[in-house]
């Protein structure tokens, strides 16, 4: 009986366990070259710098579970970042409240637009999100052609360093628990995976395929809004080009974490490990003085390796 349970556990969570072992080994390797790596301050900095990508990657995971993909996440992050800063009044006590509301609404509307075009228009997700990337990036540049703006100082300090730097961790933990519960322990999550496994089979069992996919894209948009808001506080400004690499990095993190590009299979917990692996490798390459061009090559190789490993693990 125990052997059967262990086998089932390994089949469901084997990739996640392996990816966390790899993450731990990578952290030990980096600590050899940087004695300050295993410090609380460094982990806080790593979480702060990774938080926006964590949000985008969790959104991408939900969408990939349906068998779809969203290449517009970076555009949504940038647009929400710009809207947040432009809507903010840094000189009043609650001047950040309208900015938060505006950014969340914009993220939700962007996700809804993708969802409507894909579900009602019956268009391929990759084509739709390539097109909407151009729309969102263009709107962000139209609103703010050059980086700038100012952010409410108290809001920025609280969000990035509040409670001795614990606020980003609390937010991350809360959102992770929420998204993981949605994906793994609710009828919505089961429907996501059913659609990713076979859309026709899911439809025949009574699942409202269009509604579930629409909700997934809306949730991804809201998570990207959270990324854009955090970037506003982190940079104390806005930049319409800030989201350029987020979509590809989010896909890489999700796949490295064990989310199958074919849909149905994946765990947000694994995606988190994928994000930290990407962040740590980039930090390591920066530490070694490696050009950013080689960092892109490294990310591409990581994605290829993850896809290959996923294929081998699936066959076994």
Image (cartoon, rainbow, N blue to C red):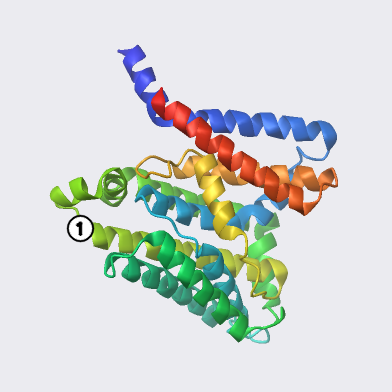
In the image, 61 versus 294, the foreground residue is 294
The C terminus sits in image quarter? top left
Q: Nearer the viewer, residue 274 or 309?
A: 309
Q: Is residue 261 visible?
A: yes
The 10 Å Cα crowd at callout 1, few under 14, some 14 to 19, many 20 or more, is few
Asked which secondary structure carries label 1, the reply is loop
The residue positioned 18% from the left and 52% from the top of the image is 203
As displayed, is residue 67 above or below residue 257?
A: below
Left or right of 130 in this view: 244: right
The x and y percentages for residue 295 are 72, 48
Query: Residue 284, how many percent across, how many down?
Result: 77, 42
Q: Is residue 200 left or right of residue 306?
A: left
Residue 198: x %, y % from top left: 25, 45
Q: Could you tell whether 216 is left or right of 103 in the image?
A: left
Measuring from the top left, give residue 106's x and y in whole percent. 47, 76
State which quarter of the image contains the N terminus.
Answer: top left
224, above or below 105, in the image: above
- Quadrant of the image occupied by residue 81: bottom right
Residue found 50% across the figure and 65% down from its top: 72
Where 43 sits versus 306, above or below?
A: below
Give the number of marks: 1
> Is residue 55 among the parts visible in the rendering?
no
Say which quarter of the image contains residue 303: top right
């Amino acid at each position: 009986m125990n052997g059967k349970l262990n086998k089932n556990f390994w089949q469901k969570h084997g990739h996640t366990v392996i990816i966390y072992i790899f993450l731990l080994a990578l952290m030990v390797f980096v600590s050899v070259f940087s004695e300050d790596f295993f410090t609380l301050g460094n982990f806080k900095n790593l979480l702060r710098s990774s938080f926006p990508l964590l949000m985008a990657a969790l959104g991408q995971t939900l969408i990939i579970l349906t068998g779809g993909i969203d290449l517009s996440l970076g555009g949504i992050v940038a647009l929400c970042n710009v809207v947040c800063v432009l809507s903010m009044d840094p000189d009043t006590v609650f001047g950040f409240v309208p900015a938060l509301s505006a950014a969340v609404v914009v993220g939700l509307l962007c996700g809804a637009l993708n969802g409507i075009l894909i579900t009602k228009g019956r268009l391929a997700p990759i084509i739709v999100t390539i097109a909407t990337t151009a729309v969102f990036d263009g709107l962000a540049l139209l609103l703010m052609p050059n980086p700038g703006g100012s952010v409410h100082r108290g809001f920025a300090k609280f969000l990035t360093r509040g409670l001795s730097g614990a606020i980003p961790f609390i937010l991350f933990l809360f959102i992770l628990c929420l998204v993981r519960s949605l994906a793994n322990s609710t009828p919505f999550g089961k429907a996501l995976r059913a659609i990713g496994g076979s859309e026709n089979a899911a439809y025949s069992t009574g699942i409202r395929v269009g509604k579930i996919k629409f909700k997934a894209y809306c949730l991804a948009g809201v998570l990207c809004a959270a990324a854009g808001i955090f970037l506003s506080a982190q940079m104390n400004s806005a930049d319409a080009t800030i989201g350029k690499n987020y979509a590809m990095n989010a896909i890489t993190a999700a796949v490295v974490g064990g989310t199958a590009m074919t849909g149905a299979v994946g765990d947000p917990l694994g995606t988190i490990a994928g994000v930290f692996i990407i962040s740590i490798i980039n930090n390591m390459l920066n530490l070694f003085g490696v050009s950013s061009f080689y960092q892109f090559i490294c990310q591409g190789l990581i994605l290829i390796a993850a896809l290959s490993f996923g294929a081998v693990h699936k066959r076994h």
